[in-house]
Amino acid sequence: MNIDPLQLTVSLFRDVLPLPNVKSCVVVPVKNEAAGLMHTLDALRCQHNGVGLHIDAHTYEVLLLVNNSNDGSYEFAKAYQQQYPKFQLHVEQINLPKACANVGTARRLLMDAAYYRLTRRGDDLGIIASTDGDTIVDRQWLHHTLAAIDAGNDAVGGRILTLAEVNDARQFHLRDVTYRCLLAKAEALIDPQEHDPMPRHFQFFGASMAVTCRMYQHVGRLPRVPHLEDMAFYEALLKHDARIRKSFDVKVFTSARLQGRVAVGFSEQLSKWVTDKKSGKLQMVESVSPQLAKFYARKRLRNCWLRKGIATTACPDLRAVAETIGQSLNSLYQDVANAQYFGSLWAQLEPSVHEQLTAQHPSHQAVDEAITALRLFITQFVPLSVSQTHPSGTYLPAGLLSA
């Protein structure tokens, strides 16, 4: 059916009401995924709890939206629904206009539909979880996701692991993941967060993310962007100081194919790495030193914000950050005092921090070199006081600046 996408949410998935005991709703956008859709649905249907027993099928449901497909994905999903009637699977099909025929629209329609279904009972305690049509969730994916929410978090990001594919892309992905996981560990050492302790990872993507209905509404729901909607949503959560847990226990397995279903995304990055290798280019990542320095600057700024009721312009942390970003002390003090959320304050100042720090050091380095530098930093890590700040303003020991 051709429908104005702005009106779709009010009509999608309204024919069957959610069961009274449904606590979570899993959304799955699908476009031409018939070949692997059985594995995706089998994994969602066969979810287990912490002791290996099947999760009660009455406590969660799956909303699957097939959009702009021509490979029989919808027909397969409907047949699967009939084959397993106890599985709370709801399937709809739409044909989005070209201007909005993208994963951003599809996922937003799904998450909005899930929100309406879960909140129609009069509370906002439900949990919206997201995965993809080419993804296989772990057998305890839902259990660990709900456990992280029950621990007091507002949102959860799961690990995205790649399935073995007949191409060279996976090795590039694994190197990138190693670098980013080490960077996440360094970040946790420098600027620890009680709600997201080590071990933690770095991912918050549509293939495995979850959020409470309360926080989903609070941040303005999924942003209206054509692609990278998961990253835009993550940024919105950060700006509202949402408690986000990136748990290694929550994991999914996704395709490492080089031809994806979206214009910008994971498959595009994999393809670029393969192309770069053929042309003799090294796999590059953001340089370690500026990023570690950024974590230190954020930690100091957070200290100021947490103490903004009693902090003054004489605060050493505030002065150190002001010097780093080249902002006047009084101006920065006002920014800190007026910020309702630390996340919004950091989003405002981070571009200046990044600009100043990358101006002092190369912006990118080879991934193997970056991994070595991070391992060295983690091994030698010692919390730094203001008196130990490096003269360059980077807050890093001199030996690591060249690592």
Image (tube, helix red, strand yellow):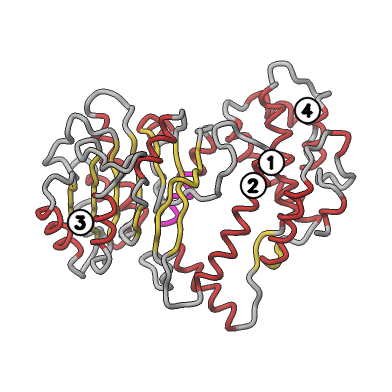
**How many numbered circles are shown?**
4
Q: Are marks 2 and 1 in contact (CB under 8 Å)?
A: yes
Q: SS of the residue at dot 1? A: helix
Q: What element carries label 4?
A: helix
From the top left corner, tell me how far across and down residue 343 is, in percent: 58, 35
Q: Position of residue 23 (x, y in %)?
A: 28, 33
In what element is the residue under mark 3?
Answer: strand
The mark that comes first in sequence, 4 or 2, is 2
Q: How far apart are marks 1 and 3 (CA)?
A: 46 Å
Q: Does the magenta stretch include residue 339?
A: no
Q: Do the residues labelled 2 and 3 touch (CB within 8 Å)?
A: no
Is the Cβ of the residue at disc 1 closer than 8 Å to that at disc 3? no
| Numbered circle sitting on residue 94 | 3
Q: How far apart are marks 2 and 1 (CA)?
A: 6 Å
Residue 75 is marked as none
Q: Nearer the viewer, mark 2 or mark 3?
A: 2
Which mark is nearer the camera, 1 or 3?
1
The residue carrying pointer 3 sits among few (fewer than 14), some (14 to 19) or many (20 or more) residues within 10 Å by Cα, namely some
Q: Name the residue under label 4.
A: 330
Question: Residue 185: which disc?
Answer: 2
**Residue lying farthest to the bottom in this orientation:** 279
- The residue most toward the front is 51
Identify which amino acid the numbered label 4 is placed on: Asn
Q: Mark 1 points at which residue?
A: 189
The amino acid type, in three-letter code, at marker 2 is Lys
Give the magenta-colored segment's residue range.
226-234
Picture coordinates of residue 245, whole percent (x, y): 50, 39
Judged from the image, the secondary structure of the residue bearing numbered disc 2 is helix
